[in-house]
Image (tube, helix red, strand yellow):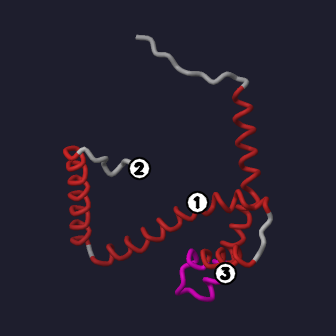
Amino acid sequence: MQTSTATVPSSEAPTRLSSRVSAATDLAPGLALCAAATAAAMGINAFIPTVSPLLIAIVLGAVVANVVDLPQRVRPGLSFSAKRLLRVGIALLGLQLLLADVLGLGWKVIVVVIAVVASESRERCSSADYSGSPGPSAS
């Protein structure tokens, strides 16, 4: 049995690389600004440890975005950060809180949580199969 593999012509490889480098250079100024804001949020968190650095960064970003006229060159990196990195940060923050709470309750509760989540997921999948509605993985 012969399998066919798709190959990329050698002329397209430099084009892909140059487009990735171009995209990275477009994002760099905004990502650098976000890194500076992250450092500021971590510094503020050292003085106010009860407030999450993520929350401080969100408030700092909202204030700066509404008070300072930011240059056009930082906008692609800020947009990327707001759409991708912020979502990941919020999910990790939620996971941290949930995990700490569940672990504090003991192993019996962890078993119950896993059983409930697995049962609910199985129920959603089976009901989607019979109802004709899209399952949980459909967007």
Foreground residue, 26 or 92?
A: 26
Q: Quadrant of the N terminus?
A: top left
The residue type indicated by label 3 comes to: Gly
The vertical placement of 67 against 19, above or below, is below
* Residue 80 spot, x, y in % from top left: 64, 57
Label 1 vs 3, first from the N-terminus: 3
Q: Report, in whole angstroms, how far the alpha carbon at label 1 lies from the one at label 2.
A: 17 Å
Q: Nearer the viewer, mark 1 or mark 3?
A: 1
Residue at image location 26% in from the left, 61% down from the top: 117
Among all residues in the image, which is located at the extreme top? 1
Disc ID at residue 83: 1
Q: Specify the segment rendered in magenta.
A: 41-56
Please say if 72 is above or below 10: below
* Mark positioned earlier in the residue sequence (2 or 3): 3
Mark 2 lies on residue: 139
Q: Determine the image quadrant of residue 16.
A: top right
Which residue does the image show at 61% across and 83% down from the upper left? 45
* Nearest the eye: 43 or 118: 118
Q: Amino acid at mark 1?
A: Lys
Residue 102 shown left or right of residue 41 in the figure: left
Residue assigned mark 3: 43
At x 80%, y 65%, the residue is: 71
Q: Nearer the viewer, mark 1 or mark 2?
A: 2
Is residue 40 shown left or right of residue 106? Answer: right
Instruction: Indicate yes or no whether the magenta region holds residue 48.
Output: yes
Q: Type of residue at label 2?
A: Ser
